[in-house]
Image (spheres, grey):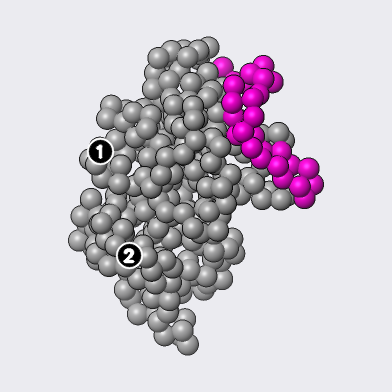
Amino acid sequence: MRAFVVEHDGDQVTSGVRDVDDDQFLADGVVTVEVQWSCLNFKDAMVLRPRSPVARRSPLIGGVDAAGVVSASADPAVAVGAVVAVHGFGLGTAAHGGFAARLRCPGTWVQVLPEGLDARGAMAYGTAGYTAMASMQALERNGVAPGSGEVLVTGASGGVGSVAVALLAARGYEVTAMTGKADEHEHLVALGAARVVGRDDLDDRPERVLGAERLAGAVDCVGGETLARILRVTRWGGAVAASGLVGGAGLETTVYPFITRNVALLGIDSVSAPPAVRDATWRALASALPAASRDALVSAEIGLGQIADALGDLDEGRSRGRVLVDPTR
């Protein structure tokens, strides 16, 4: 079997496509999936960094996402022939992942896809799309609805951000997309953004503890200082769904947004959510966008041999939207 394999040895990282022994690399789990599609995520790029905090075994088949058909199963809840997605629970970080023609995992990691989503459609969303939908659902549970006002999406040209723009716009929200890439404005408007702004757009009355009340809600894919700025300008009763840390893992803020404006900060996890939550989120994704709009999220389709360069682009912020991986290429 051909696979994209990453090896860590201290500060040295090697990666590339090679033939691997199924008995060695597919020893774990009770469900075997013939992978038809995978996709790139920021965590995949983190796996390639020296002394990566997320790569927990070596050698490792990368790929935190996969979708395909079940070819063998010892789990009665997962039928042979089912079309499934696999993500989270250490796939592609602690366990061999989706950058291969085949994977094996526990049955609890497997999500049988709802009607309306095939393997390619599922990977057009992937973990990024799942996170974007979970973010929108969290906002709505906290009272942010279409017509509430401006909803900001940060990191809007990236995986989670681009899907969030499309999902929110299709739902009827007034979406403001934030990006540091001037050449992405046209693309983000095509996805449904009402306006596109730069990274400095949140600077408002920096001499005060709070800025003017502006945002009804936000989907933040960046974290760090950007998240702190969002909280300062979220209006009374608003909510912010946070899922990213490319801007930093720290958060320097005050209690004022929470105790004077009743702002809710909502953490979004795509790794360890229980089966019922995952099922509800994937079902929502299946009907969220027409096929043509879902396809518009995909910027490229690549083979295993192109993964390393594509992940370099992703890590350096040169990537747009969703990049699909065909493990047979």
Q: Which residue is mark 1?
A: 291
Q: Quadrant of residue 239?
A: bottom left
x and y percent of residue 291 in the render? 25, 38
Q: Which disc, if any, is residue 185?
A: 2
Q: CA distance from mark 1 to mark 2?
A: 22 Å
Instruction: Locate residue 186 relative to residue 112 in the image: left or right.
Output: left
Q: Secondary structure at mark 1?
A: helix
Q: Earlier in the sequence, mark 1 or mark 2?
A: 2
Q: Is residue 153 above or below residue 126?
A: below
Q: Is residue 64 magenta?
A: no
x and y percent of residue 113 in the render? 36, 27
Q: Residue at x 66, y 50 (%)?
A: 49
Q: Residue at x 31, y 31 (%)?
A: 117
Q: Secondary structure at mark 2?
A: helix
Q: Nearer the viewer, residue 175 or 255?
A: 175
Report the span colored magenta: 1-30
Farthest-out residue, right: 10
Q: Is residue 66 above or below residue 28?
A: below
Farthest-out residue, bottom: 207
Mark 2: which amino acid?
His
**Residue 282 visible from this viewpoint:** yes
Count of numbered tags: 2
Q: Is residue 32 above or below residue 154?
A: above
Label 2 crowd (10 A; few <14 / some 14-19 / many >=20): many
